Image (tube, grey):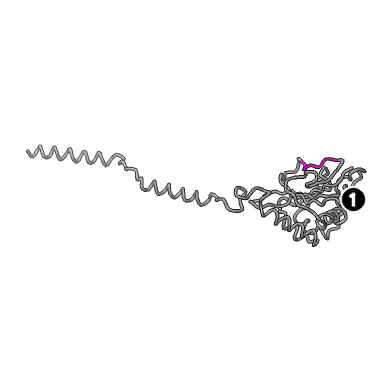
């Protein structure tokens, strides 16, 4: 009987030693795994930006966006008051302002800092060529552009959105009246000063080309239209 007990005891001891020498199995801790997953999700939710009222996905269509008219008003006030500071608020550091004396002509680019000084800077720029004569047009913004802008904003103008149609945002012309295909800004506001009743060719339109930056519209192009020979 004593031998039998010793034999049983020996077997138990050997089993215990064998168990200690192997790698123990650990049951998966689902609660810990769940906590880690939740932490990752919370972190992800924190860094993913949510849509805001000013984001491009939530702004109204361009022609219905009240922000656009606020920018147009600011620009017109800047021209009337000869305030580069006001105009500077309508453009961005990254885009600046590109001015075309004729829609088919070359761009004259101004950085935001340069645009702020438009009404005091006498630097001469190359504006391209004149309609009809083909002569080069050179001079400062004040000499070449300012009076033509005032001719429109100081007159009886109308404002149109995304159209240059005859009788709506433009007058008669021997040339084409169209938005330049190479301009990135696909939406625009036309400030159209119709011709007097007895001078049907004496009309002028300045068009503001817009681009959105983080949901806010800014002017990036200023293009002139008028009777062409």
Q: Nearer the viewer, residue 189 or 13?
A: 189
Q: Quadrant of the N terminus?
A: top left
Please, which residue is most extreme toward the front here? 197
Compared to residue 116, the image places residue 108 above or below, namely above
Please, which residue is most extreme toward the left here? 1
Q: Nearer the viewer, residue 147 or 84?
A: 147
Residue shown at 72%/50% (left/top)?
A: 95
Q: Residues within 10 Å of mark 1 (few under 14, many from 20)?
A: few
Compared to residue 114, the image places residue 26 above or below, namely above
Location of residue 81 by image quarter: bottom right
Left or right of 21, for residue 40: right
Q: Which residues are magenta?
A: 175-180
Name the spot of residue 196 as percent of width and height, x first: 86, 52
Q: Main secondary structure of the magenta part?
A: loop
Q: Nearer the viewer, residue 43 or 19?
A: 43
Assess whether residue 69 is covered by the magenta stretch: no
Location of residue 184 by image quarter: top right
Q: Which residue is mark 1?
A: 198
Left or right of 23, for residue 137: right
Left or right of 91, for residue 46: left
Name the spot of residue 172 as percent of width and height, x first: 85, 44
Compared to residue 168, the image places residue 120 above or below, namely below
Q: Nearer the viewer, residue 49 or 163?
A: 163
Q: Secondary structure at mark 1?
A: loop
Name the spot of residue 113 as percent of width and height, x first: 76, 57
Q: Quadrant of the C terminus?
A: top right
Number of numbered tags placed on the structure image: 1
Name the spot of residue 117 as percent of width and height, x first: 80, 59
């Amino acid at each position: 009987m004593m031998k039998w007990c010793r034999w049983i005891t020996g077997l138990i001891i050997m089993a215990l030693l064998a168990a200690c020498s192997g790698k123990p199995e650990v049951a998966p801790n689902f609660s810990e795994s769940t906590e880690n997953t939740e932490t990752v999700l919370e972190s992800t939710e924190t860094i993913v930006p949510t849509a805001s009222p000013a984001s491009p996905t939530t702004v109204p269509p361009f022609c219905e966006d009240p922000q656009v008219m606020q920018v147009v008003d600011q620009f017109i006030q800047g021209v009337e008051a000869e305030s580069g500071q006001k105009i500077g608020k309508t453009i961005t550091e990254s885009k600046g302002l590109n001015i075309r004396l004729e829609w088919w002509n070359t761009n004259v680019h101004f950085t935001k800092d340069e645009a702020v000084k438009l009404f005091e800077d006498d630097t001469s720029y190359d504006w391209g060529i004149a309609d009809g004569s083909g002569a080069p047009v050179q001079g400062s913004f004040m000499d070449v552009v300012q009076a033509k802008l005032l001719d429109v904003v100081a007159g009886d103008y109308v404002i149109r959105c995304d159209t240059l149609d005859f009788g709506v945002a433009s007058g008669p012309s021997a040339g084409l009246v169209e938005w330049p295909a190479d301009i990135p800004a696909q939406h625009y506001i036309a400030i159209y000063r119709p011709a007097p009743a007895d001078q049907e060719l004496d009309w002028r339109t300045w068009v503001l080309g817009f681009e959105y930056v983080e949901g806010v519209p800014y002017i990036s192009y200023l293009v002139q239209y008028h009777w062409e020979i």
